[in-house]
Each structure stands twice: as structure tokens, then as C-alpha cells.
Amino acid sequence: MHSKATGTPTPTASAPSTASRRSPVPLDMSTSFAGITLKNPVMAAAGTFGYGVEFEDVVALDKLGGFVVKGLSREPMPGNPPPRLWETSAGMLNAIGLQNIGARAFLEEKLPILEKIPNIVVIANVFGYSVNDYEETIRILNEGEGIAAYELNVSCPNAAHDGISFGQDPALLRELVWVAKHAARRPLIVKLSPNVTSIPEMARAAEEGGADAISLVNTFTAMAIDPETRLPRIANVTAGLSGPAIKPIALRMVYEAARSVQLPVIGMGGISTAEDIVEFLLAGAVAVGVGTVNFWDPCACEKLVDALERWCLEHRVESIRELIGGLIEP
């Protein structure tokens, strides 16, 4: 099956091959990073899975390795005006503007529901426009139970430094991570922006600041124009590009980051098939984030878990961990 709009394969469930039924291989799908164990490496990426509770009647949340809730800020944010989404030929532009209910409301309204679901790993994505914003948001979230880790979105503009993104300046990133790490009572993942000259340099800055893991990539800055009206397709003019179009670049960046630091790496960017997941694991990721595919198939993450299991059985992979960093280089 293919997405009508994007032409990208939609993960579907199917019976194991005859070979795998005849020769079953014990399979360990678990992976871990920063002291957190996932039952499998498939996580729903921030901004594409709401707060998780929106999917509980559609997806077996406990089947996923984990999921990252949409970005949380110290105070509620209304986001950008519409239009905020535009589908491209191989992906999607979005300029939602990090709309969210705020960290306190998340603790009061969403987290109690998630706490009732057994065997799930919940990671809270955090953002702000100053170092103090990040610090205070983390301190609020520290009060909640059932959050496994924090993921810092460092693609936000720093209001105190002419709007430059925290993720584009190594010194700013190092300072932010250091402050966030000292405020956090849980492991800290830093989500790197791809809109930089050197991903290895930013990965090292996150490591030096004290990050427990890094995730990458966030969306690429892009835009679209309506040739008939001559107006931008997105009210914000520029937006973040995600989906299959970015996968080859994202894969290269994960490969570079994994070889630049000792930190565990969570890879993401255009994943829509089991083979995509395997590629990111071979490039050095210990787990993956699945994003844009959730928009055209809300059950995509769950289907990808099944598809990855079938792939491993068919290729006689006994542990998902044997794939991590397994790229054979010429």
C-alpha cells in the first residue's frame, strides 16, 4: 500500500515468510540508552503523536518502544496562525509553532492518563526561548511521575542572542545543556537541528554540556510558494521539512554523529519502513523516532514494530542490538 498523497510505502501487517515459520529464531528486540530500556527501538517522535493520550484508542501504546510527547513550554503556547501545514511531493512542511498546553497542564491533565497505561516509556520534549525557560520547564516536569527522560528541542531561537537557534551555536548549546542537565532529575536527550554546518561539532557540544543521549534530526528549514497567488503556502513563510525526502540526509547525519561522540544516538528523519529502521541502526542509532508517517497512518508505529520483527526473523537476527553500528564500510 502507498500513501495516496506522498507515494510512500505505508507499513502494513502480513504473515511471516515460510522460511521464518519453519526456522524460528529467538529474537530479542530490546535496546537501551541512558539507563532506559525499550522493548523495541521504535519510538513515536515529538510533535507527531500529540501527548500520547490521543492515540490510546487507536494504537496499542504498550507495544511501542516509547513515545515522545509534543514540545512542552513553561507557559501555554497558541502556535502560529494558519495555514501551518503543506504536503510536499515526498514529505510535509509544518510551522505549527510549538502549540502546547504548557508543562503544568500536561502534569495535571495528560500524565495521569498515561500513568494508568502499563509498560510504556514516556519522554517529555522541552523547549524555550531562553535558558531560564528550559530550566523552569524541566523543574515543573520534575514533579511528575512516569516520565522516563527529557528531550531538549534546541532548534528554538534564543531571544537574548539575536534569534540564533541554540542548536546552531556550540557555545550556546553547551551552556543550555549544562543548565538543563543540572536541573533535570531524569536523563537528558538533546535533539539536534540539521540546519548547521557541522553535526559532529554540535554533537560534541551536547556531550560536553553533559547530555545523556542525542537525537537527530529535527526538521530542515524550507518553504513553498503558490505560483498562482505568489503567496507563501505557509503563513510563517518558512517551515520545517520532514518525511521521506529528508531520510538520506538524516541518515548521513546520524552516521556522522554516532562516530563523533560516545553518547547513544536516537535517529530519525523520514522513516516509514522496517528497512529504514535497519538503515538507521546500522548507521549507529540505538533507537529511532518515527514522525511524519503518523500523519497519514496513525497506526504506523505499531505496524513498524511488527514489520521490523518480521525483517529480523527473515534475516535470522537474534538481537536487535547486533545491528547497531553494523555498517560494513569499504
Image: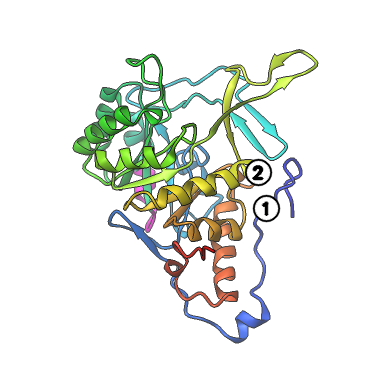
Judging by the rendered image, the residue that carries numbered circle 2 is 296
Tag 2: residue type? Trp
Q: x, y percentage for residue 59? A: 54, 52
Judging by the rendered image, the residue that carries numbered circle 1 is 10
Q: x, y percentage for residue 280? A: 51, 55
Tag 1: residue type? Thr
For the residue pair 41 and 205, the one nearer the viewer reads as 205
Q: Is residue 78 left or right of residue 11?
A: left
- Label 1 residue SS: loop
- Label 2 residue SS: helix
- Position of residue 174 relative to residue 79, above or below, is below
What range is drawn magenta here?
Answer: 112-120
Q: x, y percentage for residue 227? A: 78, 18
For the N terminus, the quadrant is bottom right
Q: Is residue 6 visible?
A: yes
As measured in the structure, the alpha-carbon distance from the residue carrying label 1 to the one carrying label 2 is: 8 Å
Q: Residue at x 37, y 49 (%)?
A: 260
